[in-house]
Amino acid sequence: FQMDRTPESYLDLFPLDAIVYLTPDSENVLEDIDPEKVYVLGGLVDESIHKQLTLRRAQEQSLQTARLPIREYMVKAPNSRNYYSETLAINQVFDVLSTYYETRSWPAALRAGVSSGKGYVLPEAVEQ
């Protein structure tokens, strides 16, 4: 993948209606990747302190939001910590998006990017 880095804000580089801010707190499910859109991946690490920060930031900037379809394709796996999180690191979100772009399969994409430590697995993993 080719990437360009710039000190400019995405708000200055792209039309607002082309930007989709990805946040696990969005009510909108990302169903497909639109090549006409620009997807912003957040950079927050500590999910317990910054709850809904990315959603609020996107709303303040009047941006569209979406979340990965984790709840739609994955199930909560039994675990001793009773821990479930849809918040992913940037590299995990990138892995999900790039795998989906290549395969057009959300199960394959989520398998590639969502670690079992998040508490979610694909349904067939529970059956095994």
Image (tube, grey):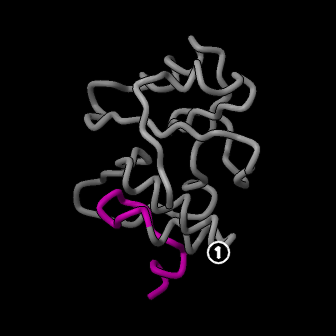
The residue sitting at the bottom extreme is 128
Q: Residue 21 placed where, x, y %?
A: 57, 33
Q: At numbered mark 1, what does the secondary structure look like: helix, strand or loop?
A: helix
Look at mark 1 in the image and give the residue it sits on: 103
Quadrant containing the C terminus is: bottom left
Depth check: give the residue in front, 82 or 4.
4
What residue is drawn where x is 66% and y is 31%?
Answer: 19
Circle 1 Cα neighbour tier, 10 Å, few/some/many (<14 / 14–19 / ≥20): few
Q: Is residue 11 magenta?
A: no
Q: Residue 92 placed where, x, y %?
A: 40, 57
Q: Residue 104 placed where, x, y %?
A: 69, 70
What residue is drawn where x is 56% and y is 21%?
Answer: 58
What residue is drawn where x is 33% and y is 25%?
Answer: 50
Q: How many marks?
A: 1
Depth check: give the residue in front, 87 or 10.
10
Residue type at mark 1: give it. Thr
Q: Which residues are magenta?
A: 113-128
For residue 62, above or below residue 19: above
Q: Residue 3 placed where, x, y %?
A: 47, 50
Q: In the picture, residue 102 is in which quadrant?
A: bottom right
Q: In the picture, residue 99 is in which quadrant?
A: bottom right
Q: Is residue 122 magenta?
A: yes
What residue is drawn where x is 35% and y is 48%?
Answer: 89
